[in-house]
Image (spheres, rainbow, N blue to C red):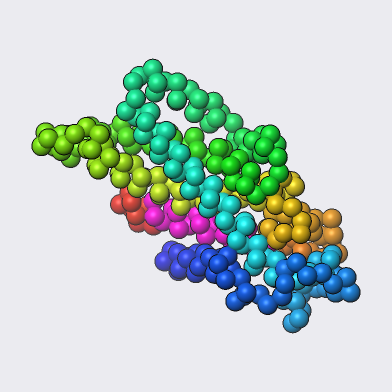
Amino acid sequence: MKAAGLWIAGLYLALVALAAFAPDLLATHDPLQTDVRAALQPPSGAHLFGTDQSGRDVLARVVHGAARSAGIGLLATALALVAGLAVGALSGIAPRWADAVLMRVTDVLLAFPEFLVALIVVAVLGPGGANVAIAVTIAAVPVYIRLARTQTRTLRVAEHVEAARILGVGRMRAFVRHVVPGVLGSLSVLATIGIGSAILAAAGLSFLGLGPAEPQPEWGLMLAGGRNVLGQAWWISVFPGLAITLTVISATVLGRALRARMEGRAA
């Protein structure tokens, strides 16, 4: 049963990837083309997911929105991983006073919910997809810093690192060759789980009107666009909402399975 769930999650994420890189293979309509005569049509053979208030095909907008919605989450996670690796590893080998300063700043950020931090950052920077990615990155990076610091402090005194030093390998070379890869492996596992949270946070900011602007297709923005006509045209919000939900669940399922495998447990 668990294996079937992993396969389903993997296949769904592959479908999302296909939608992001080759949307025309899954949707034939133009996501930006309006037709007021076809407005608010329910799901049918002509429009599988129905149409919105402007007559735009909802399926086409959901498919084309995968690139922005999933892309922002992936970009934010990648940036958080790189920044967390750099700062956390530096903190792990830095003098005690520098480590204390970095950790106190990290603790302050960890004291607030990630979405609140992202909301404050994007409110300062202004709306837009790039600013949402930056905001989600800043909100997520403290967790990566903490893990990177812990792993660095553990691995730098590991037996294989000490053995390399005894054999004449320089301190920095031993750090880069033997410590950084181990830290990166741990952060990569965390990132697979964090992708879902990043996508959800980005969609939440877009729902509040702080992400990409109309008429660009983006799942959170589409969800917000249909909330005022939910009783009359449920499909406008339900389908992008399902896309967000299934993507987050699938990413989390695969991430937890990978973490369990890395820890030597059964998924």
Q: Residue at x 88, y 70 (%)?
A: 36
The image shows residue 170 at horizontal and vertical percentages of: 19, 34
Q: Nearer the viewer, residue 17 or 267?
A: 17
Q: Residue at x 28, y 40 (%)?
A: 176
Q: Which of 76 and 240 is in front in this view?
A: 76
The image shows residue 234 at horizontal and vertical percentages of: 79, 64
What stretch of residues is rendered in magenta?
240-259
Prevailing secondary structure of the magenta residues: helix
Instruction: Examine the rendering and report whether any part of residue 147 can be seen.
Output: no
Instruction: Examine the rendering and report whether any part of residue 133 can be seen.
Output: yes
Residue 256 colored in magenta in the image: yes
The image shows residue 69 at horizontal and vertical percentages of: 62, 56
In the image, farthest residue toward the right: 37
Q: Nearer the viewer, residue 76 or 226?
A: 76
Q: In this view, does 77 lie above or below 243?
A: above
In the image, farthest residue toward the left: 167
Residue 61 colored in magenta in the image: no
Q: Give the image quarter of residue 161.
A: top left
The image shows residue 179 at horizontal and vertical percentages of: 28, 39
Q: In this view, does 164 lie above or below 242?
A: above
Q: Which residue is drawn at 54% across and 26% down?
A: 108
Q: Which residue is drawn at 72% across and 50% down?
A: 207
Q: Give the image quarter of residue 165.
A: top left
In the image, farthest residue toward the bottom: 45
Q: In this view, does 121 lie above or below 227?
A: above
Left or right: 82 as drawn, with respect to 161: right
